[in-house]
Image: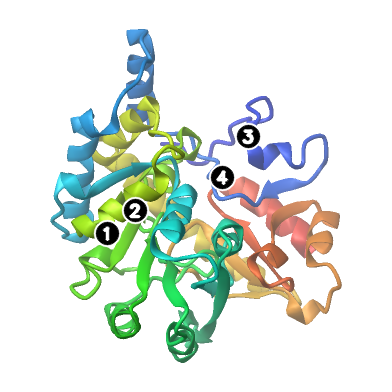
Amino acid sequence: MNFDQKPDRSSSFAYKWEKYKDTDVLPCWIADTEFRCAEPILDALKQRAEHGLLGYTLPKHHQPALDAIVHWCKRQYQWDIHPSWIVWTPGVVPAFNMATLAFSNIGDGVIVQTPNYPPLLAAPGINHRKQLAVPTMLKEGRWTLDLEAFEQQAAKPSTTLFIMCNPMNPAGSVMTFEELDTIAEICQRHNVMVCSDEIHCDLILDDLRHIPAGKHPSLKDNSVTLMAASKTFNVAGLGTSFAIIPSAKVRSSFVAAGAGIVPWVNVMGLEATATAFTKCDEWYQAQLRYLRDNRDYLVRAINRIEGLTCEAPQATFLLWVDASALQLEDTQRWCEERGVGPSQGKDFGAPECFRINFGCAREYLEQIVARLSA
């Protein structure tokens, strides 16, 4: 659990590092961490590989993974779920595209928050729906959804779906019960389905508790909750996530949308999920402490750089930085000329901003700060 280590990923074909290969730019863009997986996960994958047979494994037959999710939901969110509510998907992005197909028609309006991470913003358009953007607002040092604008979009007769991101990416806010209450009431009144991307929900850094959409009494029968071990335990490359859908009717529509197109999750992802949720708590708690310290250091450092401002995210390992005071034509170029490669804000709907991934060794983060300060 030495999070100060800086693993060499140069020969691993890691997406984050391939982008700036053979340059002096430090990558801090895509949302995976620079932390070695917990040893129990690596041991489980080795044991499965040593078995020597990697044939078809139907996810619904992998009882340890199902039991692990039930256990995790009870422990983390005080949410009692039934294994039959779980639908496995090969990633959250395929899942909210499935939801778009299942719960809207061509030409319908699909609400998304802005700024938001690129695949979520793209989902309405690539499925021939109309993207209805609702902005987030800075309120008392915290980004929150503009609920008045949300109601205006939800009230449109053609609006059928809201793809929610909670905790928010890139803003890092965790929705309160009161906010979910208002969203649920608006969606019920206007017959809008909710698909909630909660992939970062186990990376809450403040003293807050995550409330899954499907746990909220008014959203239980009107929502799809998307989760995964991938961000929390750095196993995103194994392509395994799950939807929790209490309503049998909603679940059936969701499954039908992916029939014959969306593949089963792979057996290694199932093994990793089962192990992550049952045998890695010490690693998990240590990572949260490390990320909390990294966040606090980075927020202080960024706010000392002239022209840059940020708010401390309540969750995730991602910091949203506002560079509008620099009045730049190309914010990303400004960063890259200083040897730093963040996620570019224009992909999130805010070209004057950028996103830094602080899920890395402190020394690496200090190098990023030093370059941006130069």
Tags 4 and 3 touching, CB below 8 Å: no
Earlier in the chain: of badge 1 and badge 3, it is: 3
Disc 2 crowd rating (10 Å Cα; few below 14, some 14-19, many 20+) is: many
Quarter of the image with the C terminus in it: bottom right
Residue of label 1? 250
Earlier in the chain: of badge 4 and badge 3, it is: 3
Where in the figure is residue 45, as x and y percent of width and height? 37, 22
Residue of label 2? 254
Is residue 185 placed above or below 68 in the rendered structure?
below
Query: Splitting the image into 4 quarters, where does residue 250 fall?
Result: bottom left
Distance from the alpha carbon under mark 3 to that under mark 2: 31 Å
Disc 4 crowd rating (10 Å Cα; few below 14, some 14-19, many 20+) is: many
> Residue at horizontal 30%, vertical 69%?
208
Tags 2 and 1 touching, CB below 8 Å: yes
Earlier in the chain: of badge 2 and badge 4, it is: 2
> Residue at horizontal 30%, vertical 65%?
223
Distance from the alpha carbon under mark 4 to that under mark 3: 17 Å
| Mark 2 element type | helix
Camera-side residue of 235 and 37:
235
Q: Which mark is residue 361?
A: 4
Q: Is residue 200 left or right of residue 87?
A: right
Q: Nearer the viewer, mark 3 or mark 2?
A: 2
Q: Amino acid at mark 2?
A: Phe
Is residue 141 placed above or below 9 in the rendered structure?
below
Residue of label 3? 14
Tags 3 and 2 touching, CB below 8 Å: no
Q: Amino acid at mark 3?
A: Ala
Camera-side residue of 166 and 26:
166
